[in-house]
Amino acid sequence: MRAVVLLFLLFFSPTVWGDAMSGSLMTISAMSSVDNIVSKKDSMLGELFAAKGSVSLEEISVSVEEGMNNSGALKVHVVIVYEEHLVEELRKMSSSMYFRMVDQLVKDYPDKMKIFEWELVAKKRLIPPTKVEYPNDHMTPLAVYAFADYSSPGEHRVRIANYYEKVKITLDREDFKILQRK
């Protein structure tokens, strides 16, 4: 697409704007705009596929590191979402907001989400993997979010990529990370 636009601008810009020099400058400016449009389009397509693609998650394992949550207890939820509106709602929530609202979310969307949950203490260990089952065969899971109720400031929310089949959640002192497992 960029090549077609470039050829069009190179051949027609001097005719349209009269001066070859200003046409060349306009061509460079237009190509910059085309690059921005293509970049935004690629970004939007990535978000579209992330939001609309089917979820592949099969297994979740959790690793607790020494001193997790500054040596305090921690709640962790992995939420599989079946409703587009709920995907957008969760995308905007910090973990503290999510944990304040989770009971109401379950009441509002009883069959639109599945929650895997752990309540952990700060002791270095690996929790056995949890197999992910999808109880709603007639519904397509749209997204997966992980929330951890850390006492430290921060969002503590991660959207797990739809193409991840196995993930490992590593709970560190002040935040967590998601790793794709083989």
Image: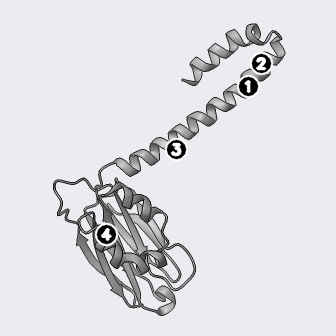
Residue under pointer 2: 24
Q: Are marks 2 and 4 in contact (CB under 8 Å)?
A: no
Residue under pointer 1: 28
What distance separates the C-alpha of mark 3 from that of mark 2? 28 Å
Select label 4 or label 3 by which is in front.
4
Q: Where does the image place residue 118, in percent across and percent down from the top left?
A: 32, 81
Q: Residue at x 49, y 86 (%)?
A: 69
Callout 2: few (<14), some (14-19), or many (20+) C-alpha neighbours within 10 Å?
some
Q: Where does the image place residue 182, in percent across and percent down from the top left?
A: 32, 60
Tell me the amino acid under the disc marked 1. Ile
From the image, which quarter does the N terminus lie in?
top right
Residue under pointer 3: 43
Question: Which of disc 4 and disc 2 is earlier in sequence?
Answer: 2
Q: Residue at x 43, y 58 (%)?
A: 88
What distance separates the C-alpha of mark 1 from that of mark 3? 22 Å
| Residue 104, quarter of picture | bottom left
Callout 1: few (<14), some (14-19), or many (20+) C-alpha neighbours within 10 Å?
some
Q: Where does the image place residue 62, in percent across and percent down from the top left?
A: 35, 76
Secondary structure category for the residue under label 3 = helix
Callout 4: few (<14), some (14-19), or many (20+) C-alpha neighbours within 10 Å?
few
Secondary structure category for the residue under label 4 = helix
Select label 2 or label 4 by which is in front.
4
Q: Which numbered circle lies on residue 168? A: none
Secondary structure category for the residue under label 1 = helix
Residue under pointer 4: 108
